[in-house]
Image (tube, rainbow, N blue to C red):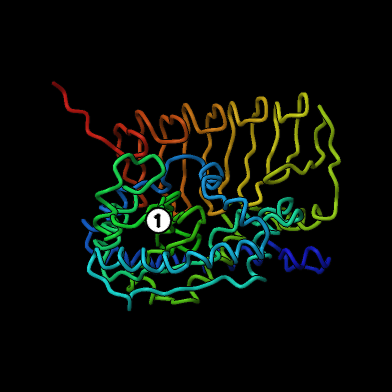
């Protein structure tokens, strides 16, 4: 669609195309839901006990933790820097698989082709790629670990969370991975748990960004039974579904994005209605002293969109954040994060309404399941807790 917009080609009516894609998306979600329902419930609950995004925060904020080092700025340098420690990625992944009873037969190594790397960077980070800056490309070198059970995935996630940036005691997880003797530096920067918030078509897996001696790689954790339902075709469908999230009414985001690539900034201070290109996306709305301030809409290069109030360049006040996956948050923001009262609805139809703090479910709230049941309780940093009186 991006290329069609650049070429000025006619696109099929969005309502017709969107309806067919949404129908296929519902069909895929139902298929994966049936498959998940056949797996041990306790194992699935163990995985869903982990945060949807770790460390907690807004996706674009957490993504910035995974930026590549300066020595991997250009596309050529990105490939060259990553290949130096590629062997360590395979060693780490092999030991991680071995720690849960898997072997090298469960590993798949892949390298993103330059054309795919460039296309993704141009679409999501046009200003950076125009400066030949590809530091946001963190999935160039990737290892997939195909687990035989959900228990194995949950155990791998437990090990990985113990290697986060703010972890003080790293000796135990490194000992489990048989890497305690090495002088190499391993840091898990981000874990995206799509068993909690599946991909647009319902496919559940876990995405991990691992920094090795400064360079960021990607590790994917799959369940064999779920992966083999659709294979590579399923993952390709998920990428296509991302262009048709719930609530979108037209191709505007893609066509506008294509048109914006050849345009300069048009909006000045205190103007509204004109598009202004900024780092990370495009903005239209009110400004003050050169910063987003008042009412406005920001279109992120990732496909996310925020509509609402701003203060000194940050989301602050009431607003709606639309995720590219189809998830949506409506409520209060403070200092660029979800904070206060709000409602979060995921693409699968489940929702939470209640208190948020610093981007996380925190405080009193109510969770609605797919079958319409409501569960009231108390949340602490995105996890439901039981309050025990003394």
Please give left or right for residue 142 compared with residue 260 in the image: left
| Residue density around tag 1, few if under 14, some if 14–19, many if 20 or more, within 10 Å | few
Q: Quadrant of the C terminus?
A: top left
Q: Residue at x 57, y 32 (%)?
A: 336
Residue 136 in the image: state x and y as whole percent.
60, 54
Q: Nearer the viewer, residue 358 or 185?
A: 185
- In the image, residue 66 sits, relative to residue 336, either above or below, namely below
Residue, far top: 390
Residue 19 in the image: state x and y as whole percent.
60, 64
Residue 107 in the image: state x and y as whole percent.
37, 73
Q: Residue at x 53, y 62 (%)?
A: 139
- In the image, residue 360 sits, relative to residue 244, either above or below, namely above
Is residue 23 at all visible to an observer of this figure?
no
User: Which residue bears the numbered disc 1?
Assistant: 184
Secondary structure at numbered mark 1 = loop
Q: Nearer the viewer, residue 314 or 12?
A: 314
Q: How many marks?
A: 1
Q: Residue at x 44, y 54 (%)?
A: 348
Q: Quadrant of residue 377?
A: top left
Q: Residue at x 22, y 69 (%)?
A: 101
Q: Quadrant of residue 240?
A: bottom right
Please give left or right for residue 100 compared with residue 369 in the image: left
Please give left or right for residue 138 compared with residue 275 in the image: left
Q: Quadrant of the N terminus?
A: bottom right
- In the image, residue 345 sits, relative to residue 68, either above or below, namely above
Is residue 293 at all visible to an observer of this figure?
yes
Residue 168 in the image: state x and y as whole percent.
32, 39
């Amino acid at each position: 669609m991006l290329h069609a917009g650049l070429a000025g080609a006619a696109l099929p009516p969005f309502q017709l195309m969107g309806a067919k894609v949404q129908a296929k998306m519902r069909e895929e979600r139902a298929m994966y839901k049936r498959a998940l329902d056949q797996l041990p419930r306790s194992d699935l609950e163990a995985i869903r006990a982990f945060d949807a995004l770790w460390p907690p925060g807004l996706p674009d904020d957490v993504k910035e933790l995974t930026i590549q080092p300066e020595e991997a700025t250009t596309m050529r340098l990105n490939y060259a820097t990553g290949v130096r420690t590629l062997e360590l990625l395979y060693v780490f992944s092999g030991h991680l698989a071995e720690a849960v009873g898997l072997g090298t037969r469960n590993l798949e190594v892949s390298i993103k082709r330059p054309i795919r790397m460039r296309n993704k960077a141009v679409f999501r980070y046009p200003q950076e790629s125009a400066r030949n800056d590809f530091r946001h490309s963190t999935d160039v070198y990737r290892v997939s670990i195909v687990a035989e059970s959900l228990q194995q995935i949950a155990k791998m996630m437990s090990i990985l969370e113990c290697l986060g940036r703010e972890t003080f005691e790293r000796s135990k997880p490194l000992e489990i991975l048989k890497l305690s003797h090495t002088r190499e530096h391993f840091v898990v920067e981000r874990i995206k748990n799509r068993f909690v918030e599946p991909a647009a078509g319902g496919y559940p897996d876990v995405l991990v960004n691992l920094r090795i001696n400064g360079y960021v790689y990607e590790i994917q954790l799959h369940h064999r039974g779920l992966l083999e339902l659709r294979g590579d075709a399923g993952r390709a469908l998920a990428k296509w579904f991302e262009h048709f999230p719930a609530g979108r009414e037209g191709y505007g985001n893609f066509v506008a994005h294509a048109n914006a690539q050849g345009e300069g900034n048009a909006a000045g201070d205190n103007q509204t209605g004109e598009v202004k290109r900024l780092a990370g996306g495009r903005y239209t709305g009110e400004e003050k002293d050169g910063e987003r301030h008042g009412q406005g809409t920001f279109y992120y290069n990732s496909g996310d969109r925020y509509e609402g109030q701003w203060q000194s360049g940050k989301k602050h006040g009431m607003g709606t954040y639309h995720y590219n996956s189809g998830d949506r948050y409506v409520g209060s923001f403070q200092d660029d994060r979800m904070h206060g009262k709000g409602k979060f609805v995921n693409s699968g139809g489940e929702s939470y309404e209640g208190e948020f703090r610093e981007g996380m479910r925190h405080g009193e709230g109510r969770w609605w399941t797919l079958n319409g049941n409501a569960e009231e309780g108390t949340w602490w940093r995105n996890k439901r807790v039981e309050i025990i009186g003394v």
